[in-house]
Image (cartoon, grey):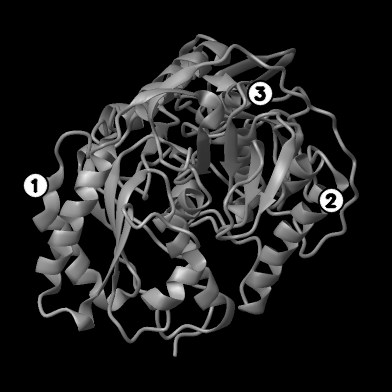
Amino acid sequence: MRTYLQINPKDNVAVALAPLSAGTAIELDGISLTLSEDIPQGHKFALKQIPEGGQVIKYGCPIGIAKEEILPGQWVHIHNIKTGLGDLLTYTYDRKVTETAPTEERFFQGFRRADGRAAVRNELWIIPTVGCVNNIATAIEKKAQSLVTGTVEAVAAFPHPYGCSQMGDDQEHTRQVLADLINHPNAGGVLVLGLGCENSGIDVLKNYIGDYDPNRVKFLVCQESEDEISDAMDLLKELAAYAGQFHREPISCSELVIGMKCGGSDGLSGITANPTVGAFSDLLISKGGTTILTEVPEMFGAETQLMDRCETEELFHQTVDLINDFKEYFTSHGQTIYENPSPGNKKGGISTLEDKSMGCTQKSGTAPVRGVLAYGERVKEKGLNLLSAPGNDLVASTALAAAGAHIVLFTTGRGTPFASPVPTVKISTNNRLYEKKQNWIDFNCGTLVEGGTLTELRDRFFDYIISVASGELVKSEKAGFHDMAIFKQGVTL
């Protein structure tokens, strides 16, 4: 088993794939050194002398600046490295031509909706228009579990605190995301639950929903009902009868839309799980499918790699705006743009935002960027898309679902039990996490450091995602978790 790795020949640091003790002799491509201190798993150590003010290189790119002289064999982390990033930058379009050659078609067992769209689940969703009816929605969900029968696979409510006392774009985004979820194909039937006096009431929300099938989407205004739970159950029974008519059938993987997100990253994220997801993305795109990468603040420092893969100059400029608009969002609230890695990230070996971002963007694979989406916008282009959303796990995963993702892939070095409105696959970066939290983790990429190839792991992971798309429940679904969160961006009245 390998115990350390130099990711790129240009790197002046290596990563410990297992805990390494002070005094360990390192032999790597003609470099001989002895570790001067203990190096935790996922953390970095210097291969060469790095002067104060010198660049620390990982993934072949700068990930920070040395705060002091760092000698070969020393631990490289937040105590002796800082970000090298600035604020708003000027970018130049330097397209790197990348192509994904077509591969053999694959199929999953999914649901074909009346409007022709594909789905991987057949659930009944209860969508509140406003937080005031959250408890009612949750009570209805509990009472309606008897409707989970036949091909109806779940009944889930999605409480949230918004829908009223909002202004401007903040209110518009709430309405758009709620409408996106109402229109999501994984919901075979949807009950939209309103209060009756909110800003984003049902009559307003219908303008965002657009044309809908009254057999699939039904509405209830609680203030207009004598017994809203009884009336809701009557409507859900009608929805269950409608949704129960759908059955799984073979559907081409070219119709799959997969969201990609990471959280609680560690030093192995960019070596094991994220590259596996990137290889999966390329493979799905080669079969005509679609992937969506989000968490814009975790692109900072690696954004030019995505910009250079934009298929057109227009997409390049949209990506520049994607990055700079988020930076301006930070500064408009008086926040530091580059103070991103969380305590868990740092404990796992992530030292700077560049370090995290270079690992994060591994999930995008090598395919060209074919679409750039605003928050709340639904995917239109097949292939790799970039989506505007923050790094927060639940907010970003909900945004992926709202954009049209059937499934969200979530890589993690720390673990988390959360779910999103769609199946959320937890992918561990290291063996220890997988062994400890098997009630959370669905797939382990930590084995990559022990041997085998990325291609072999990618193929096994692709087969697993086909099984999830065909109905295999992920761990959070087995636990009965269905979560959502909307991006709060404005004042509350």
- Pointer 2: residues within 10 angstroms few (<14), some, or many (20+)? few
In the rendered image, the vertical position of residue 453 relative to residue 281, given as above or below:
above
In the rendered image, the vertical position of residue 393 relative to residue 311, given as above or below:
below
**Of residues 390 and 229, the one drawn nearer to the viewer in this rendering:** 229
Task: State the mark number for residue 314.
Answer: 2
Question: Quadrant location of residue 432?
Answer: top left
Q: Mark 3: which amino acid? A: Gln
| Marks 3,2: beta carbons within 8 A | no
Query: How far, Cα to Cα, is label 1 from label 2?
Result: 51 Å
Q: Which residue is mark 1?
A: 146
Q: Which residue is mark 3?
A: 6
Q: Point out the tag, 3 or 2, that comes first from the N-terminus.
A: 3
User: Callout 2: helix, strand or loop?
Assistant: helix
User: Callout 3: helix, strand or loop?
Assistant: loop
Q: Work out whether residue 291 can be spotted.
A: yes
- Pointer 3: residues within 10 angstroms few (<14), some, or many (20+)? many
Q: Which quadrant would the C terminus be assigned to in this image?
A: bottom left
Q: Point out the tag, 1 or 2, that comes first from the N-terminus.
A: 1
Question: Quadrant location of residue 134?
Answer: bottom left
Q: Mark 1: which amino acid? A: Ser
